[in-house]
Image: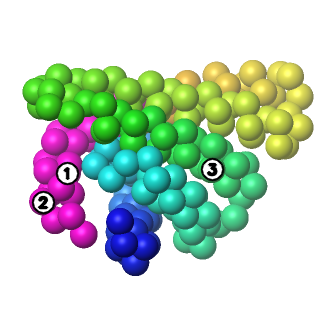
Amino acid sequence: MNKTKFVVRSAMCVALLIAGQLALSSVAGVEIVTVMMLSFCFCYGISHGIAVATTFSLLRCFVFGFQIQVIILYLIYYNLFALFFGWLGAHLTGKNALLKTAVVVASALVFTVLFTLLDDVITPLIFAFSENAAKVYFYQSLYTMIPQLVCTAVTVTILFHPLTKVIKKVNF
């Protein structure tokens, strides 16, 4: 692939992710990044996914602030996310749309839980929480995870197929 096209495609994906995150940032538990990122990775593969994940993780800080625990969390999480969904996109070809969507939704839900669990490890370590404070942080995060799981289930179920169709058709 042409290097210019790779950079432009990756930059467009990052811009759309940041815009989507910013647009919904005031609504607690509602986000669009998961379905957008997984659709990009699914369609464009691991190399684009890693470029987008890393760039998004760093550039979003200019909008939302530089917090070391968030930077570390995003760099770890979204790069693992990109690896998995880029791989999945290469291996779920030719399957029926319903099965593909079911596998992607289930995987997205697992990754949503993983995001929270990674945060439950990274944040207490960065800020040297006491054991009790880390437990409180963990249990509080479970309540936060519920709306995130509902949002992920709904957005990925509804938007995955149309988004991948548009991405493949436009092929920017």
Q: Mark 1: which secondary structure?
A: helix
The disc, 3 or 2, on the residue closer to the chain's N-terminal end is 3
Side of 126 where 63 appears, left or right: left
Q: Quadrant of the N terminus?
A: bottom left
Q: Which residue lies under the disc numbered 3?
A: 75
- Frontmost residue, 133 versus 91: 91
How crowded pointer 1 is (Cα within 10 Å; few <14, some 14-19, many 20+) is rated as some
Relative to 107, does residue 6 appear above or below in the rendering? below
Left or right relative to 56: residue 86: left
The secondary element bearing badge 3 is classed as helix
Tag 1 and tag 2, C-beta contact below 8 Å: no
Cα distance in 3D space between marks 1 and 2: 10 Å
Q: Which residues are magenta?
A: 149-172
Residue designated by label 1: 163
Disc 3 versus disc 2: nearer the observer? 2
Determine the residue positioned at 61% across, 64% down: 58
Q: Amino acid at mark 3?
A: Leu
Residue 109 can be seen, yes or no: yes
Q: Residues within 10 Å of mark 3 (few under 14, many from 20)?
A: some
Q: What is the crowding at mark 2: few (fewer than 14 residues within 10 Å), some, or many (at least 20)? A: few
**Numbered circles on residues, count:** 3
| CB-based contact (under 8 Å), mark 3 and mark 1 | no
> Could you say which is closer to the camera, residue 117 or residue 89?
89
Image quarter of residue 15: bottom left
Instruction: Identify the secondary structure beneath mark 2.
Output: helix
Would residue 166 be counted in the magenta stretch? yes
